[in-house]
């Protein structure tokens, strides 16, 4: 058995909710908002994955030499802010002009994150080997 550190990356859209860590089908630990990292014991060949409410992550197979995993969401801080400001800018533009397509763009931007909490719920969290 080897020790594995699982870190939760801080993000604007990742502040609420407890992330549960699974090895196989067994829940072994949780990371909440105030915890940056946890340590779990794994065997080589085990699959580690994470779950937050109804959304989950990919499964990572533990190989020799893997010491640290990081959990994040599908949106980085930069992407989250870009979508937020683009939605606000196009909404204001649609209010100031008579072009219809400016009014549709904020709706499409709002649907992008909605996909990840419905149909793409198994891709909402990203679990990857830290370098």
Image (tube, grey):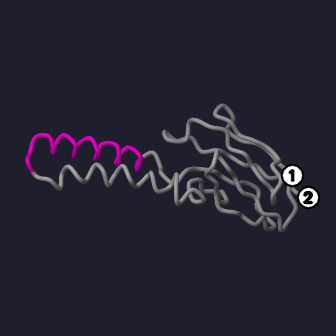
Image quarter in which the N terminus is found: bottom right
Disc 1 to disc 2, C-alpha distance: 6 Å
In the rendered view, would you say 101 is above or below 77? below
Q: In the image, is residue 89 part of the stretch drawn in magenta?
A: yes
Mark 1 falls on what kind of element? strand
What label does residue 87 carry, if any? Answer: none
In the rendered view, would you say 121 is above or below 89? below
User: Residue under circle 1?
Assistant: 41
Q: Which quarter of the picture shows residue 19? A: top right
Image quarter in which the C terminus is found: bottom right
Q: Which quarter of the picture shows residue 130? A: bottom right
Residue 56 in percent (x, y) is at 64, 54
Q: Residue furthest right?
A: 1
Cβ atoms under marks 1 and 2 closer than 8 Å: yes
What label does residue 1 carry, if any? Answer: 2
Residue 127 in percent (x, y) is at 64, 57
Residue 18 in percent (x, y) is at 67, 39
Residue 92 falls left or right of residue 120:
left
Mark 2 closeness class: few <14, some 14–19, many ≥20 residues within 10 Å = few
Mark 1 closeness class: few <14, some 14–19, many ≥20 residues within 10 Å = few
> Residue at left 52%, top 54%?
118
Residue 109 in percent (x, y) is at 33, 52
Using the image as rendered, state which of residue 55 and residue 4 is in the foreground. Answer: 55
> Residue at left 26%, top 41%?
88
Mark 2 falls on what kind of element? loop
The residues colored magenta run: 78-98
Q: Residue furthest left?
A: 98
Q: Which quarter of the picture shows residue 14? A: top right
Using the image as rendered, state which of residue 22 and residue 60 is in the foreground. Answer: 22
Between disc 1 and disc 2, whose residue precedes?
2
């Amino acid at each position: 058995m080897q020790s594995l550190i699982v870190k939760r990356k801080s993000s604007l859209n990742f502040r609420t909710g407890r992330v549960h860590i699974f090895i196989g089908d067994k829940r072994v630990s949780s990371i909440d908002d105030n915890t940056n990292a946890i340590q779990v014991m794994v065997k080589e060949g085990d699959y580690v994955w994470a779950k937050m409410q109804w959304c989950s992550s990919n499964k990572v197979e533990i190989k020799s030499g893997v010491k640290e995993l990081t959990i994040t969401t599908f949106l980085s801080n930069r992407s989250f802010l870009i979508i937020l400001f683009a939605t606000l800018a196009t909404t204001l533009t649609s209010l100031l002009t008579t072009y219809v397509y400016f009014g549709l763009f904020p709706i499409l931007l709002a649907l992008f994150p909605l996909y990840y909490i419905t149909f793409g719920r198994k891709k909402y969290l990203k679990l990857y080997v830290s370098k």
